[in-house]
Amino acid sequence: MDVAIAGSHGLIGSALVADLLARGDTVRRLVRRGAAPSDPDGDTAAPGIRDVPWDPRTGELDPATLEGVDAVVNLAGAGIGDHRWSAAYKQTLLGSRTTTTSLLARTVARLDDPPVLVNSSAVGAYGSRKDEVLTETSTRGDDFLAGLVKAWENATSPASDAGARVVWLRSGLVLAPSGGALGKLLPLLRLGLGGPLGSGRQWWSWITLTDEVAAIRHVIGADVDGPVNAVAPEPTTNRELTRALAGALHRPAVLAVPRFALRIAVGQFAGDLVASQRVVPGVLSRTGFTWTHATPQDAARWVVETNEVSAPR
């Protein structure tokens, strides 16, 4: 399989590149004009990797560089939790997604044999819905993140209009041994200082990095299009997930973090941390996807054990 990837140096992108190469696949990494082509370790491009120059700001991407690929995977976009949501950063979040997605979609549309476009998305599409069970057919929410996701997904329309198969991979919280949603929580839990966020009763729909990568591979080959919820089979409350992680660390998880403290610490993003999204993976289940980490206990053990093995001694 030959896969082009935008956002190949991020948490998910790096894991996806490594997984594809291990399987003997070929990877074309889209790299910004002026960026030095390199692998995640800083060396020249490894065997099986081809670096493709592009510049979403100027609309530069030669369609010939994507000829023959089986799939284009778009993981590009500024981090949701990297900064406070000022008016300027909200525009950065939006522009970093719609500009890159639109360029990729237009380029895919120009190819004689358009590949599948797997476009990163988020369960934020549904907004905060309390205990409502949310599937791929559920209506969209009406908050900032839901609007962001709508614009992000709509930017793929040139590809679908040209007949390409387009998948919107609506991911939940991606759990990994380092970085991602747990980057700041794990150290606190390890010290016995972590606990539920807000009431802890909000539903958190999550997926491990291992299963996120597997889901991307799955939708490349499966006969699916449109929204696909990339989440574990059973949603979990924030309290349950935190307890599972603390249990794997053999630490207590009793120090709840009140909403006002979250607001002080991270600003408007606090609303997303206490949002309740009970999302289920209807399409993945229906098309035979198998999870490696299906329960919060499975995920917690993997996160903690992998983190301990990889930690510097």
Image (cartoon, rainbow, N blue to C red):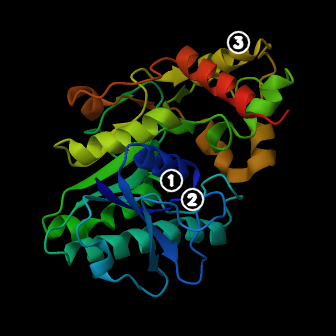
When asked about the image quadrant of residue 291, the answer is: top left
Q: Nearer the viewer, residue 126 or 236?
A: 236
Determine if residue 126 is in view: no
Marks 2 and 1 in Cβ contact (< 8 Å): yes
Q: Which mark is residue 230?
A: none
Q: CA distance from mark 3 to mark 1?
A: 29 Å
In x, y percent, where is residue 18? 50, 48
Question: In the rendered structure, which amino acid carries the disc numbered 2?
Answer: His
Question: In the rendered structure, which amino acid carries the disc numbered 1?
Answer: Gly
Note whether 143 is above or below 131 in the view shown.
Answer: below
Q: Which residue is mark 3?
A: 247
Q: Which residue is mark 1?
A: 13
When asked about the image quadrant of residue 263, the answer is: top right
Left/right of residue 255 with respect to residue 200 in the rendered view: right
Q: Which residue is mark 2?
A: 9
Q: CA distance from mark 2 to mark 1?
A: 5 Å
Left/right of residue 250 with respect to residue 79 in the rendered view: right
